[in-house]
Amino acid sequence: MRIAILNRDRCQPRRCSHECEKYCPRVRTGDETIIFKDDGKPVISEELCVGCGICINKCPFDAIMIIGLPEELDKPIHRYGENGFALYGLPLPQKGRVTGILGPNGIGKSTAVNILSGSMVPNFGEDKGDWNIVLDYYSGTGLYDYFKALIDQNIRISQKPQYVDKIPKAFSGKTRDLLESADERKVLDELIDKLELEQIIDRNISQLSGGELQRVAIAACASKEADFYFFDEISSYLDIYQRINCARLIQEIAEDKAVLVVEHDLAILDMLADMIHVTYGISGGYGVVTYPKGVRISINQYLKGYLPEENVRIRPEPIEFEVHPPKIETDIQSVLEYPEFSISYGEDFQLSSESGDLKEGEVLGIVGSNGIGKSSFVKALAGEIMTDKGDLDIGVKVSYKPQYIAGDSYIQVEHFLRKITKKFDSSYYQTEISKPLQLEPLYDRMLNELSGGELQRVAIAACLSRDADLYLLDEPSAHLDVEQRSMATKAIKRFAENTKKTAMVVDHDIYVIDMLSERMIVFEGTPGLTGYAYSPTSMKDGMNTFLSNLNITFRRDEDTLRPRVNKLNSRLDREQKSNGEFYYYNI
């Protein structure tokens, strides 16, 4: 089976003079495979296309894809017009369970949710969708009962959006006003306590940070009276303690409701979900939703890149984890030192930091709860804010990627990056930065048109493109899927090693910190009041300090060696705590 995908945004027939039409081979009927419409952009006849690839090679703008699909994929559940994106399969929400969706961005997760919420009628590849056809197609399955109840308006939906930073643009007023308007279940006081919203409940929405907006969005979704709850990426901007709190809240909702969760933090998805649908395909081309599988099995299969039940390889190489914690190379010289310093915001917040040294070619992970000064720490090193005590004029060039990225510039991605670096056309830049960050498909796009994940990858590339001695990246994993996080992690790590430059990365994804860092800086304090940054320490000591403060232990999966959260007060949890080994246990 073969489908053709045309990216109509990239197709520019006025500039290429219909190169794909000129070189397209004819088929038996004498008709051309490519037939042009009035807009000058092609439509590919999938019945006549032989998959020779000539039109793909001749297109100078990479606008065409011819994709061979597994034979068992009969027809799509939904397709966005002729030669548009196609979705195969749907997840099945089940009452009393948390159903997870695991897969890359851009392969139909949002489309599936729009169908399940009733805002989109699946068309099965035809011009228009019909609910009667949907019911006939799913007759005798669990989705028939679901869609029948949805059509009869017997199912209510509550949905948490993916990009919480857009909430202030849609709502103005105090946090309490927003949550009270959503509180159909009359559980607002309980949610304020569980999600620790006391300090922000009377503040304006426009004044909230990303992590605070995330918790408010989760509270608003959870407070509605619904039968089906959908949470899209609960972990962005939250520290690990807050992520676990939110996961436990969602599990409570699922005791008598159906819950669907899209999440890229594998540690959280592992402890949160009861079953998982793996999704695979080509971003912007097609997406396939598998049947539900056990949590451990599905995550491990996804990391290995092979789904044995479907007999499909979804990735050429597995995502692997280190067996041992990174070792400190004592012969690596320190390239710079920073002194003790402190920062205060009036009487509201005080940050103090010990002195530290940074080594050549290393990546330091920075971990700690939200609201205790991690972003202020890197901003001070970047020269973005002034210190009250301690001179941070360390005499080196600094490149800084902030936590919150503004994508409001009317400039093409390629031009934006070319303005930053003269090395854009070099093979090194394309191989080590552009390719792992998957930037080439974005070159012709405008910055203000990019999604959160796309903008994040461009921001990482921009940071690494600048000529500097110290690179500071604040939450580079936000809005990236599992594969993108792995590739971005490798790009940052290889960049530091190859250029002998130092990088410091603030992140809340334990997997990212585990794969990226050689040493760590641990923050402690009281969120919103005080913060204290320790000197850089080894990964083992740093993880023990950090996780002991959170009262959380991790074990390693026997098959993939990925970190997994231990159940609180389980035998292994108690044993590791008594031995003082919160992370690298039996390694």
Image (cartoon, helix red, strand yellow):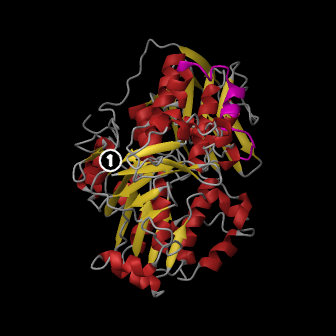
Circle 1 packing at 10 Å, graded few (<14), some (14-19), many (20+), is many
Q: Is residue 30 visible?
A: yes
Q: Which residues are magenta?
A: 406-427
According to the picture, the residue beneath numbered tag 1 turns out to be 302
Give 197 or 93, whichever is nearer the viewer: 93
Q: Is residue 419 magenta?
A: yes
Position of 577 with respect to 253 (left or right) is left
Give how far across and how far down residue 210 sits, in percent.
62, 54
Q: Residue furthest front?
A: 30
213 up-or-down from 414: above or below: below
In this rendering, the answer to whether 421 lies above or below 259 is: above
Residue 42 vs residue 446: left or right? left
The amino acid marked with disc number 1 is Tyr
Q: Residue 107 lies in magenta, yes or no?
A: no
Residue 579 at x, y percent in the picture: 28, 42
Identified at 73% across, 65% down, the residue is 204
The C terminus is located in which quarter? top left
Residue 435, how many percent across, how many down?
50, 31
Is residue 488 visible from the viewing direction of this image? no
Left or right? Give the position of 117 relative to 297. right
Q: Quadrant of residue 388?
A: top right
Percent x, y of residue 326: 38, 27
